[in-house]
Image: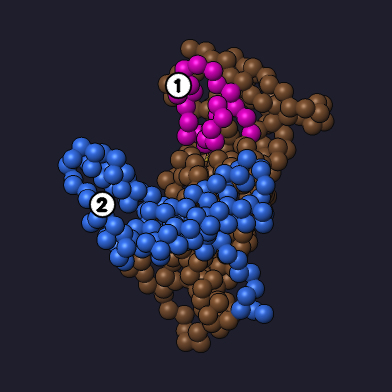
């Protein structure tokens, strides 16, 4: 079986504008979108650029728009597209070349919410003990810990498209993941970022982020639970004076 | 002042929006069912005097809040964000017009109840 696959090319040194190019690609039931792209690069045109690494929905680097929907190339199959198939770079990000986008726009937001365990301050003086956690405590955040930073949710979010300052679904899901972790003491540091207009409050509950997430993280749930947390945090700040 | 730094009214609008959403989902269909289907079909008997007495009591105030005021703020919030999505208006004027209208509707409804 063969399929015509259209790819949106962008080669800033040669063409000022992006353009579509069609490739005739053999496929069977096991051919993923990423396999098709690799065939194109190896057999038809070595100048086509795209990112990938793991081929198993773990590294999060193969996000593209497939027929207008954000998808992981390695988790989506050519057989799912019986008619036209066109592949573009992830929406809402700056395109660097062909299917490669500047992920910094997402990573900056991710960094801002400190997505790592933060120790109690000042650090306890007694010798370090293991941090025990019960299965119930783990269950609280486990779903949000599955994020692979692929950025599909940002390509799906119309609010991020309108306002790139919006911290966005993926970063908020990870902030929420650490806030819910019984070993963490960093919530006071994360809340001021989430409390702003560009934090959880930019979300208008479109919910498409959760539809496209390849790992079932449900970032929309994290953002909207984050609104409850943010409202509480602002109330506390108002009554206590200071966060 | 540290106490107020970074605070804004969004949680208030969102709180009213959420409460109004519950009312929209729970009370408005019930009210519509009773007044537009069950009563005209004669399944429930409504008599004017009883209704008036009921409306004049605290039940009437709760009815006003749950069926008019909170849904009005819910709608205002939706419209404001819908305008933002369409890149129309935005900022202070959207806030003033949307929630202002909801506030006027609410005050008017409460005033009618108060005078009933
Ligand atoms: S929340 Fe899901 S869609 Fe968003 S970056 Fe994480 S894994 Fe990707
Ligand atoms: S190649 Fe790693 S997620 Fe697709």
In this rendering, position of residue B115 left or right of residue A159: left
Horizontal and vertical percent for residue A121?
Answer: 55, 81
Residue at (55% x, 46% y) in the render:
B79
Q: Using a 10 Å C-alpha cutoff, classify the residue at mark 2 as few (fewer than 14 neighbours), some (14 to 19) or many (20 or more).
A: few
The chain letter of the blue chain reads B
Image quadrant holding the C terminus of chain B, namely bottom left
Give the camera-side residue of A180 and A11: A180
Q: Which mark is residue B2?
A: none
In this rendering, position of residue A51 left or right of residue A209: right
Q: Chain letter of disc 2?
A: B
The chain letter of the brown chain reads A
The answer to whether A75 is drawn above or below residue A142 in the figure is above
Q: Chain letter of disc 1?
A: A
- Mark 2: which secondary structure? helix
Asked whether the residues under the numbered discs 1 and 2 touch, taking CB atoms below 8 Å apart as contact, a structural biologist would say: no
Which residue is farthest bottom?
A125
Magenta region includes residue A78: yes
Residue at (30% x, 48% y) in the render:
B31
Horizontal and vertical percent for residue A139?
Answer: 35, 60
Residue at (18% x, 47% y) in the render:
B45
In this rendering, position of residue A222 left or right of residue A65: left
The answer to whether B45 is drawn above or below residue A23 in the figure is below
> What segment carries the magenta color?
A66-89
Q: Residue under label 2, please give it.
A: B48
Magenta region includes residue A221: no
Q: Residue under label 1, please give it.
A: A79
Horizontal and vertical percent for residue A39?
Answer: 58, 23
Give the camera-side residue of A72 and A130: A72
- Mark 1: which secondary structure? helix
Which of discs 1 and 2 lies nearer the camera? The answer is 2
Residue at (49% x, 61% y) in the render:
B107
Horizontal and vertical percent for residue A130?
Answer: 41, 75
């Amino acid at each position: 079986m063969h399929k015509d696959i259209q790819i949106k090319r962008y080669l800033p040194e040669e063409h000022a504008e992006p353009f579509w190019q069609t490739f005739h690609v053999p496929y069977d039931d096991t051919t993923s979108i990423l396999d098709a792209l690799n065939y194109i690069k190896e057999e038809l045109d070595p100048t086509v650029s795209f990112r990938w690494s793991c081929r198993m929905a773990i590294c999060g680097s193969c996000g593209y728009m497939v027929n207008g929907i954000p998808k992981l190339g390695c988790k989506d199959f050519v057989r799912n597209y019986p008619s036209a198939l066109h592949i573009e770079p992830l929406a809402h990000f700056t395109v660097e070349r062909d299917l490669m986008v500047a992920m910094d726009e997402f990573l900056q937001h991710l960094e801002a919410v400190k997505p790592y365990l933060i120790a109690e301050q000042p650090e306890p003086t007694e010798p370090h003990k293991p941090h025990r956690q019960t299965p119930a405590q783990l269950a609280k955040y486990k779903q949000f810990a599955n994020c692979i930073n692929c950025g599909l949710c940002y390509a799906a979010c119309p609010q991020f498209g309108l306002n790139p300052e919006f911290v966005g679904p993926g970063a908020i899901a990870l902030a929420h993941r650490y806030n819910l972790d019984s070993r963490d003491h960093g919530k006071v540091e994360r809340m001021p970022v989430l409390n702003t207009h560009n934090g959880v409050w930019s979300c208008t509950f479109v919910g498409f982020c959760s539809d496209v997430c390849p790992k079932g993280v449900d970032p929309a749930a994290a953002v909207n639970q984050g609104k409850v947390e943010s409202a509480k945090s602002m109330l506390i700040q108002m009554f206590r004076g200071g966060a | 002042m540290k106490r107020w730094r970074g605070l804004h009214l969004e949680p208030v609008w969102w709180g009213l929006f959420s409460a109004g959403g519950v009312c929209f989902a729970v009370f408005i269909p019930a009210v519509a069912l009773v007044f537009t289907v069950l009563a005209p079909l004669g399944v429930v008997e409504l008599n004017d005097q009883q209704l008036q007495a009921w409306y004049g009591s605290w039940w009437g105030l709760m009815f006003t809040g749950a069926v008019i005021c909170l849904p009005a703020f819910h709608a205002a919030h939706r419209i404001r964000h819908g305008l933002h999505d369409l890149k129309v208006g935005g900022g202070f004027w959207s806030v003033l017009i949307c929630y202002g209208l909801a506030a006027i509707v609410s005050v008017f409804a409460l005033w009618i109840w108060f005078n009933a």
